[in-house]
Image: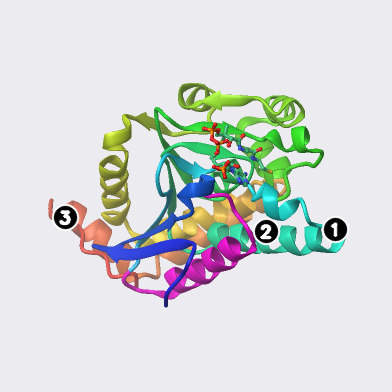
């Protein structure tokens, strides 16, 4: 499939989506969102893809939703745009493979929101995060009012959303938004290392952990623990569990087959 606003490649188990509108710092318009959604759906069902990475071309990750396009929107367009953004991020969050945001530069507005839809965020020292929507007379529309608070806590999220403040990579790490910060020219190599580490673990186990942790966070503790119990016990019926434990006992590396 060919896309105009993103690049997509699959190499050695890693699918990489690169938002590719560097002239506008990879701003998200309807077309980018639709192309991202189509690619995420493809990656989710492609057995070759074990880990998905999202990054941006040039000096930006994603400098937010496309303000030129949004300037023309009425309420109906806003609804459609929000729906598409939510659908794309739900596809990321519910795919049963880990997704890494490799934040190489500006991750503002929709950029922070896309990174929040990933399982974790690795950032270059050039990364900048923030939800500046209120400065444009709107609010975050791709989950920022909800996922940011779930990640960094309501107080910090309120402050970021109400002030529109932009924070650097170290501050984003300090508040728990970013997992690790790397030099710009190291970022993609480090992300590949992290992806390889994920790929050495049981894929069904990671899928189960992702599902239970994402769903459980919105449930009362007893229901969330029930989810965990079901997923935990189900894994004992898998070949991956037999292999993982046999490999440990035999002091060899496990070879998981996702079965
Ligand atoms: N939507 C549309 N175009 C955007 C954009 C966005 N979100 N962000 C940047 N661009 C465009 C600029 O208009 C500019 O286009 P031009 O060269 O035709 O003038 C180009 O990208 C480069 O941006 P510029 O502002 O010149 O770069 P900068 O380094 O001086 O500043 C930012 C970078 C990210 C601080 C600044 O572009 C910015 O504030 N962008 C908007 C961020 C935002 O509010 N996002 C949330 C949207 S809901």
Between the C-alphas of marks 3 and 2, the distance is 39 Å
Q: Look at the image and say whether residue 64 sits in the magenta stretch.
A: no
The residue carrying pointer 3 sits among few (fewer than 14), some (14 to 19) or many (20 or more) residues within 10 Å by Cα, namely few
Image color mode: rainbow
Q: What are the residue bounds of the magenta stretch?
A: 26-48
Expressed as whole percent of the image width and height from the top left, the position of residue 72 reads: 78, 56
The residue carrying pointer 2 sits among few (fewer than 14), some (14 to 19) or many (20 or more) residues within 10 Å by Cα, namely many
In terms of sequence position, does the residue under pointer 3 or pointer 2 come before the other? Answer: 2
How many numbered callouts? Answer: 3
Q: Which residue is mark 1?
A: 74
Q: Residue at x 48, y 27 (%)?
A: 173
Viewer-nearest of discs 3 and 1: 1
- Tag 3 secondary structure: loop
The residue carrying pointer 1 sits among few (fewer than 14), some (14 to 19) or many (20 or more) residues within 10 Å by Cα, namely few
Q: Which mark is residue 253?
A: 3
Q: Look at the image and say whether residue 34 sits in the magenta stretch.
A: yes
Q: Is mark 1 within 8 Å of ligand 1?
A: no
Name the magenta segment's main secondary structure. Answer: helix
Expressed as whole percent of the image width and height from the top left, the position of residue 258 reads: 34, 69
Q: Which residue is mark 2?
A: 86
Would residue 226 be found to the left or right of residue 16 on screen? right
């Amino acid at each position: 499939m060919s896309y105009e606003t993103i690049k997509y490649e699959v190499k050695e188990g890693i699918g990489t989506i690169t938002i590719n509108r560097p002239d506008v710092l990879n701003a998200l318009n309807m077309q980018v969102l639709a192309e991202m959604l189509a690619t995420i759906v493809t990656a989710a069902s492609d057995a070759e893809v074990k880990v998905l990475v999202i990054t941006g071309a040039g000096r930006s990750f994603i400098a937010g939703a496309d303000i030129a396009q949004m300037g023309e929107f009425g309420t109906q367009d806003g609804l459609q745009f929000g729906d598409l953004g939510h659908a794309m991020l739900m596809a990321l969050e519910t795919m049963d493979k880990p997704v890494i945001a490799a934040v190489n530069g500006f991750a503002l507005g929709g950029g922070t929101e896309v990174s929040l839809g990933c399982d974790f965020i690795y950032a270059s020292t050039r990364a900048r995060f923030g939800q500046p929507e209120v400065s444009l007379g709107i609010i975050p529309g791709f989950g920022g009012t909800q996922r940011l608070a779930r990640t960094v806590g309501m107080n910090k999220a309120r402050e970021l959303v109400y002030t529109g403040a932009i924070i650097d990579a170290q501050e984003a790490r300090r508040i728990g938004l970013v997992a690790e910060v790397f030099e710009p020219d190291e970022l993609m190599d480090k992300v590949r290392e992290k992806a390889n580490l994920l790929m050495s673990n049981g894929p069904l186990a990671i899928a189960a952990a992702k599902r239970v942790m994402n769903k459980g966070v919105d449930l009362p503790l007893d229901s969330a623990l029930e989810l965990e119990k079901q997923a935990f016990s189900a894994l004992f019926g898998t070949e991956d569990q037999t292999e993982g434990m046999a490999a440990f006992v035999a002091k060899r590396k496990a070879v998981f087959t996702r079965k």
